[in-house]
Image (spheres, rainbow, N blue to C red):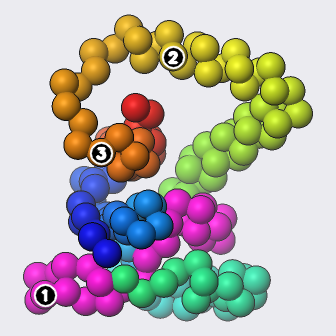
Amino acid sequence: MSDIEKIQLFEDKKIRTVWVEKEEKWYFVVEDVIEVLTESRDPKQYVKRMKLRDPELSKGWVQIVPLLSIMTEGGPQKMRCANIEGMFRIIQSVSSKKAEPFKRWMAQVAAERINQMIDPERSFDQAIALAAALSRRKRPSTISSPRKNSLSPSLKNNSSLEIAAL
């Protein structure tokens, strides 16, 4: 398994990520995301309390957040990580004002997707608009792995999460 590790920045705070080649998915260190969204001084304790508040999350925790090897200053360590779907589920249980804009964004994306499923023509129209917008942008001359780049999260200033669409 060939994993690629990256550090993403979210509001100038580090979020460690790792690409798991076998699954072709990005995973995020849960502790890092919780720390950023809650400003908790002890993200591990926050997670414990969150799991107590949400028994359904607690039941599926091991499946949602596998232990993955993450490089740290002291060498590789096994850390709880979640892919994008798992992070969405976890963030639903975060009770923090700072998480609310992200939750609203998730709800908007979900609503758009449901509307596309109900009315496939809407999905087609959005795909045409996206293709036109992308054709106006300059494309990079080389892309090492389109699949990785298309799934690679880019966490930019303030509270925006953008999934690069290449």
Report which residue position mark 3 lands on.
145
Nearest the camera: 124 or 43? 124
Mark in the foreground, 2 or 1: 2
Q: Earlier in the sequence, mark 2 or mark 1?
A: 1
Q: How many marks?
A: 3
Nearest the camera: 25 or 82? 25
Report which residue position mark 2 lands on.
131
Q: Which residues are magenta?
A: 69-93
Q: Which residue: 27% across, 54% down? A: 9
Q: CA distance from mark 2 to mark 1?
A: 43 Å
Q: Which residue: 26% across, 79% down? A: 70
Q: Earlier in the sequence, mark 2 or mark 3?
A: 2
Q: CA distance from mark 1 to mark 3?
A: 27 Å
Report which residue position mark 1 lands on.
75
Disc 3: CA contacts within 10 A as few (<14), some (14-19) or many (>=20): few
Disc 1: CA contacts within 10 A as few (<14), some (14-19) or many (>=20): few
